[in-house]
């Protein structure tokens, strides 16, 4: 990146901040003279692309105010990005000047290198993500400054390529119509198969290390593309789950670069993973007007075109020469990798190079905070190779600067003093290292729960979720960033501060759980089975508050012994998730099997809040009573009740009388020696029993309530069953 281009990009960032908060910016450099024309033009284009705005100018309006037909006016108080606050009806921006000063004190203002520009972007994200741009109102100052820098870089490159002239910068209406931009996207296929192709030994570490490795691979690909294009991370619109969007200049040099770059990446995937993983990429030319959805529908057309090109490429993945190379006979080997089953590149342990490296690095990838990308393979360190001849190492301390270090990714933290260190948001919560540790418990069934879930209709929301007038690239970029922060960062806080518990506890405590992956909109979390029920409820509640109930999540929770094959777990929980997705309106969770599929309101209010609570209240009152006149009620009684309820569902005319007889046996016995204290207790017990019996009679006569009751009983039995019982229900 040339010094002149850096000057332009720095100016676009500083100018955007100084225009809004001039007082704290007086000590910093004003926009450079040769950058003023580009900064002015990019600012005009960015504001045109942003579309109409509603709300207050002194506090950041929530993006979800107008998503999916919502009509609200919630705002955020001024805060740092890692505070992850929820939108409110009234909020203050009093901290804005303080946060802005912190942002610029944390970054060196001298435009010395592209790495330093990325560092400035990182600091801006930290401190001004919840500060309002008064002109935009529902876009943060960070989002507008970032996009302003992206547009500036496009204009600069188009000027250098002589696609536009300096005079064009002053004619905004015509500039809006020129196709100066390329929206580039890539999408990776085969990710889930790659992650779940592991052995049972060390399954949890294996899952997490393979997931994290792919995350790093995607970041390295994005980083290298931006480096070769002489751009910064300002041009990265979205990344997550093996998918990315990047805003690029529509120049002949860029189109040639993309063609060569995409082929190089595909060659590396094919050489490294054969056909197991594939990266498809495509781009389409667009104007500022179309990115601003002018005319109506043009914004959707951009993303539809890119998506169609990627789909077409996936249907025709390989050239004839590549297919011939893939089908060349390999040298004969007596063994194959015990994990991925390829028979070439076997190491000393009988594993291929990738699986062997991931196995050696598994603990480091999970426990260490810094992930160093090097251009040379370091001696005496466990490494794994990456695209472009790079190597990955995991380290406990941030290393000193050296020429061989290309990039350092720091988990969920910003390292202001190291220019090559970039914060990597990642859901990395882990309270245990093995499935056995997660399943261990003093009371209840020893099983792990696995939750797979993702956001309903996210693609539709991303492209068409806002009202037509509000559809624009700035809104989409801010929207995707906010969701990534939720699933890659806020999820750690949700797991650390578990609120809902099946046992009725109101204590906020850490979940017994491990995040396998949490992408831009989906997740795979394993843990103690009851903690997974509680976490699912917490996740639903948090997402509802964060998005103002404009986005919903559907998923499935499977129940497994610790040594259950991981590939089967992935397949079965995926089927449970799909079952939820097929419910009309989605917004559902399937618990253990299809009979336990409920929309969230039914699960939380009717299954857990009503029926489970009724069971817990009744058996807490009577189940632990050792009085001979009121014998202990055990799980065997509940198994019998479940059997009778299922018979009721099969139209057995005798089942209801049997249930009546069964419930009569639970009636508390009247004390033989009726002293006052015992009689008072008997009357209260009788009232509690009668209430419980009446509820059961009501529920078993309705098919849906009968199903809810069965799920509640199943959960209650699992919570209270002897932990050494081997067989499931």
Image (cartoon, rainbow, N blue to C red):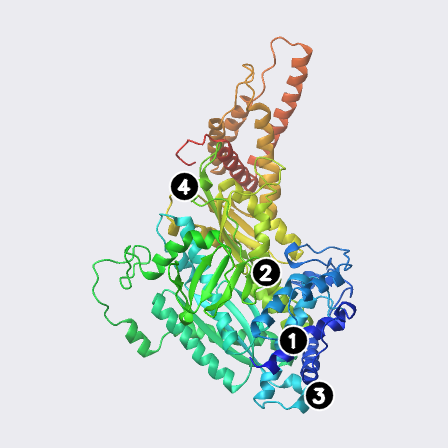
Distance of mark 3 from mark 2, alpha carbons?
38 Å
**Nearer to us: label 3 or label 4:** 3
Across and down, in percent, residue 243 comes to: 50, 67
**Between disc 3 and disc 1, whose residue precedes?**
1
**Nearer to us: label 2 or label 4:** 2
Circle number at residue 414: 2
Mark 3: secondary structure: helix
**Between disc 3 and disc 2, whose residue precedes?**
3
Across and down, in percent, residue 22 comes to: 77, 71
Residue at 58 percent across and 21 percent down: it is 667
Of residues 601 and 562, the one nearer the viewer is 562
Across and down, in percent, residue 636 comes to: 46, 27
**Between disc 3 and disc 4, whose residue precedes?**
3
Circle number at residue 10: 1
Distance of mark 2 from mark 1, alpha carbons?
20 Å
Q: In which quarter of the image is the N terminus?
A: bottom right
Distance of mark 3 from mark 4, alpha carbons?
68 Å
- Find disc 4 in the rendering and name its residue: 561
Circle number at residue 170: 3
Of residues 417 and 41, the one nearer the viewer is 417
Quarter location, residue 3: bottom right
Quarter location, residue 339: bottom left
**Between disc 2 and disc 1, whose residue precedes?**
1
Mark 4: secondary structure: loop
Q: Is residue 9 left or right of residue 555?
A: right
Vertical side of 374 occupied by 533: above or below: above
């Amino acid at each position: 990146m040339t010094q002149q281009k850096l000057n332009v990009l720095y100016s676009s960032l500083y100018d955007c901040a100084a225009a809004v908060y001039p007082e704290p910016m007086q000590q910093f450099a004003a926009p450079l003279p040769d950058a003023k024309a580009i900064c002015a033009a990019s600012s005009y284009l960015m504001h045109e692309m942003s579309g109409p705005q509603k709300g207050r100018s002194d506090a950041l309006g929530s993006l979800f105010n107008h998503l999916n037909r919502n009509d609200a006016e919630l705002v955020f108080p001024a805060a740092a990005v890692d505070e992850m606050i929820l939108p409110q009806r009234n909020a203050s921006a009093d901290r804005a000047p303080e946060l802005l000063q912190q942002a610029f004190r944390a970054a060196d203002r001298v435009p010395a290198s592209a790495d330093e520009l990325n560092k400035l972007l990182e600091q801006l994200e930290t401190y001004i993500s919840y500060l309002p741009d008064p002109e935009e109102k529902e876009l943060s100052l960070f989002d507008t400054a970032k996009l302003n820098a992206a547009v500036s870089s496009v204009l600069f490159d188009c000027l250098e390529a002589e696609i536009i002239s300096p005079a064009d910068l002053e004619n905004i209406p015509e500039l809006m119509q020129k196709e100066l931009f390329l929206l580039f996207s890539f999408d990776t296929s085969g990710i889930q198969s790659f992650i779940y192709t592991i052995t049972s030994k060390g399954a949890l570490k294996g899952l997490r290390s393979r997931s994290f490795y792919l995350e790093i691979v995607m970041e390295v690909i994005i980083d290298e593309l931006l480096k070769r294009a002489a751009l910064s991370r300002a041009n990265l619109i979205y990344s997550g789950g093996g998918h990315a969007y990047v805003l690029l200049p529509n120049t002949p040099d860029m189109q040639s670069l993309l063609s060569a770059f995409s082929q190089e990446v595909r060659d590396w995937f094919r050489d490294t993973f054969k056909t197991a993983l594939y990266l498809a990429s495509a781009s389409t030319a667009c104007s500022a007007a179309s990115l601003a959805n002018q005319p109506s529908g043009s914004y959707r057309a951009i993303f539809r075109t890119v998506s169609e090109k990627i789909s077409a490429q996936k249907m025709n993945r390989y050239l004839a020469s590549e297919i011939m190379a893939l089908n060349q006979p390999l040298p004969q080997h007596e063994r194959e990798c015990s994990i991925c089953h390829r028979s070439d590149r076997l190491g000393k342990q009988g594993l291929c190079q990738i699986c062997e490296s991931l196995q050696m690095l598994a603990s480091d990838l999970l426990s260490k905070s810094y992930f160093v990308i090097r251009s040379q393979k370091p001696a005496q360190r466990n490494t794994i190779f990456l695209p472009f001849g790079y190597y990955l190492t995991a380290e406990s301390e941030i290393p000193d600067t050296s020429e061989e270090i290309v990039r350092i990714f720091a988990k969920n933290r910003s390292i202001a003093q190291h220019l090559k260190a970039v914060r990597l948001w990642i859901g990395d919560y882990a309270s245990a290292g093995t499935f056995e540790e997660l399943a261990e418990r003093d009371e209840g069934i020893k099983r792990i729960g696995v939750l797979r879930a993702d956001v309903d209709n996210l693609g539709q929301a991303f492209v068409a979720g806002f009202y037509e007038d509000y559809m624009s690239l700035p809104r989409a970029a801010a929207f995707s960033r906010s969701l990534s922060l939720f699933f890659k960062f806020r999820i750690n806080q949700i797991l650390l501060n578990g609120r809902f518990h099946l046992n009725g506890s109101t204590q906020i405590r850490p979940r017994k759980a491990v995040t396998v992956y949490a992408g831009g909109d989906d997740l795979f979390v394993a843990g103690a089975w009851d903690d997974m029920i509680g976490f699912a409820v917490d996740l639903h509640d948090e997402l509802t508050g964060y998005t103002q109930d404009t986005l919903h999540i559907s998923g499935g929770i499977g129940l497994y012994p610790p040594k259950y094959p991981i590939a089967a777990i992935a397949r079965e929980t995926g089927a449970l998730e799909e079952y939820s997705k097929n419910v009309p309106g989605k917004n559902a969770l399937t618990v253990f099997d299809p009979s336990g599929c409920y929309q969230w309101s039914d699960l939380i209010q009717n299954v857990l809040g009503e029926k489970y609570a009724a069971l817990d209240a009744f058996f807490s009152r009577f189940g632990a009573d050792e009085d001979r006149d009121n014998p202990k009620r055990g799980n065997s009684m509940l198994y019998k009740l479940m059997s009778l309820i299922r018979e009721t569902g099969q139209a057995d005319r005798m089942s209801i009388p049997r249930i009546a007889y069964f419930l009569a046996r639970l009636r508390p016995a009247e004390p033989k020696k009726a002293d006052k204290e015992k009689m008072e207790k008997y009357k209260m017990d009788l009232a509690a029993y009668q209430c419980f019996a009446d509820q059961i009679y009501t529920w078993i006569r309705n098919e849906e309530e009968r199903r809810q009751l069965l799920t509640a009983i199943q959960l209650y039995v699992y919570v209270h069953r002897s932990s050494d019982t081997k067989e499931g229900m």
